[in-house]
Image: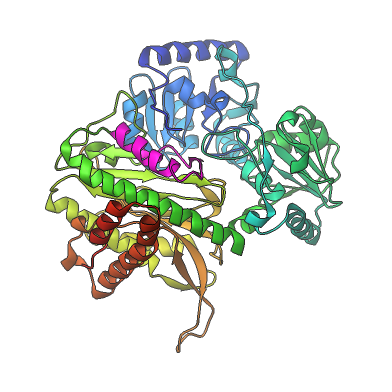
Amino acid sequence: MFQSFDEKTQPEEGIGRLADLRKHLEGQGVDGFLVPRADAHQGEYVAACDERLSWLTGFTGSAGFAAILPDIAGVFVDGRYRVQVKAQVADVFTPVDWPETRLEDWLIEQMPGGGVLGFDPWLHTQAEVARLEQALEKHQISLRPMDNAVDAIWSDRPGRPEGAASAYSDAKAGRSSAEKRADIIEALQADGDAAVVLTLPDSINWLLNVRGQDLNHLPVLQAFAILQTSGAVQVFCDPGKLDANALDGDVTVADWPAFEAALVALDGPVRVDPATAPQAVFAALQTAATEIHRASDPCLLPKAQKTSAEIAGTREAHLRDGVAMARFLHWFDETAPGGTLTEIDVAKQLEAFRAESGALKDISFDTIAGAGPNGAIVHYRVTERTNAPVRQGQLFLIDSGGQYEDGTTDITRTLPVGDVGEEEKTCFTLVLKGMIAIHRARFPKGVTGAHLDALARAPLWATGRDYDHGTGHGVGVYLSVHEGPQRLARSGNVPFSPGMILSNEPGYYREGSFGIRIENLIYVVEVPEGADAHREMLGFETLTFAPIDRRLITAEMLAPEERDWINAYHAEVLAKIGDRLDKEGFGAARDWLAAACAPI
């Protein structure tokens, strides 16, 4: 499963591909073209055939986009990728800090005389296109839908994925597909809708209780779907991938080309999510003068509110994963000081420990294994060229996860290699204080991630520090490791509700020196009222059990309640994971774990 990545595009390739694209655009009568990272499903993970941004520019991050104009080609990335993008594309393309610099403002500056900007309507959401059109119209810049210009010059573009899909058990899901569909139909009827168009693969796979093999690390069948209030469901995908036993009688399957015709044939109102559905879907419905109800994907919230079966499965997956992590941390502690390891060695060994459980289906994302300065690259992905040795006196950041049929895991630990400086320990302890604040948070119903995000940052802010990513994201169950709609971030605007799984991962990064991140998964629970409570309260329960390196903690910086929390957490880690290590015959790792979990 581990892939040793090389950059897909070298500078000389990027120059040639950019020139070919510009030549093609001249013949299409447009002055530029947008190249998003997204595919038609707007997911974080894309198939090899949809890696247009990476193929053209060399940028391998999981989020970003490019705007190709005659005299400049900008690659827009957020704070997670600022270091990475400079290393990968700056020789040919111009990195642009996004969202600080908005695309519309950049286009207005770079196209002062106006012009026509082409885009593929299957790769941009309706909300995105509408916002751009409104901002650019008064500056005489127009948008034109067109066939994908990158595809036109990508002569060796890979084919579509061919993996089969299969049923996901009702027992693991906690509800049958028919039960889920009945609830969605009830919600549609309450809003007066006749049908809903679904374009997110994880929504469709959740709704139908199926899983697939179309994408690395995300076990989904890529598809579009239409659910009508009559109960009929049409799924549009490669029909040969779906076993007939995976679906019930109300579900029919058609090939991709039938999707647009099915849209045109729908009676309205038809619910479509403007934040996730391609502009092409809206254009097809508008062609038929079908009434459109613009509203969020109705699967998002019920998918996020996990059933008791999903929570139970996820807890078991994390205990299994915790055994692998304890074995890994023991191995790293013994091996890393010898000076023989590289980042790739570390990533491969961790995956090997997970695989030895016999239950691992895939890793949940490309392992982030950053030694020293590479740890400061938030979403660093090691390549053969960047593969750094693990050296004494460094911090090592390892962010990883597993896909198991009963749950999806995601954990980050920052580890010392020998003795590290006091500054690193101070920063680590500040990050830990923020993480503990989230774990201990208690809050009324109606609170969102935007309300709680500051709790994790406050210790860093007090010392003039911060980090350029959200504090946490939603997590699926044998689905996407990054799942909405809930977020623990400044942009998180969805109220938390019981059953939602989130990551808790504050960090601190010093470019060229070190990176720190500590991450556990947590889930939302109802908290019993206390003597003075007069409203319903929520809090978090912990899913992830692995020691947090005590050698990096400056104990005198912790408040008594923070010290109590870390000691209680480590006692629980030892109780839950230590017993399993004993039973599975890993006595040396169990002894190491006991020392690692000793009270501060």
The figure's colour scheme reads rainbow
Would residue 468 appear left or right of 248 to someone viewing this image?
Answer: left
Is the residue 79 above or below the residue 106 in the image? below
Residue 258 appears in view: yes
| Residue 500 falls left or right of residue 200 | left
Name which quarter of the figure residue 309 lies in: bottom right
Residue drawn where x is 34% and y is 66% of the image: 569
Dividing the picture into quadrants, the one containing residue 581 is: bottom left
Residue 321 in picture, x, y percent from top left: 43, 51
Left or right relative to 23: residue 243: right
Would you say residue 448 sits in the magenta stretch?
no
Q: Is residue 555 left or right of residue 269?
A: left
Q: Is residue 593 above or below residue 247?
A: below
Foreground: 75 or 230?
Answer: 230
Magenta stretch holds residue 357 = yes
Query: Which residue extends farthest bottom?
Result: 531
On the question of residue 116 being in view, the answer is no
- Image quadrant containing the C terminus: bottom left
Residue in the foreground of this view, choosing between 460 and 67: 460
Expressed as whole percent of the image width and height from the top left, the position of residue 370 reads 29, 38
The spot of residue 540 in percent (x, y) is 46, 67
Residue nearer the viewer, 74 or 234: 234
What residue sits 22% from the left and 41% below the top? Answer: 335
Span highlighted in magenta in the image: 343-368
In the rendered picture of this protein, how many numbered marks are placed on residues? 0
Where does residue 585 sit, x and y in percent of width and height?
36, 52
**Residue at point 66%, 59% (across, down):** 174
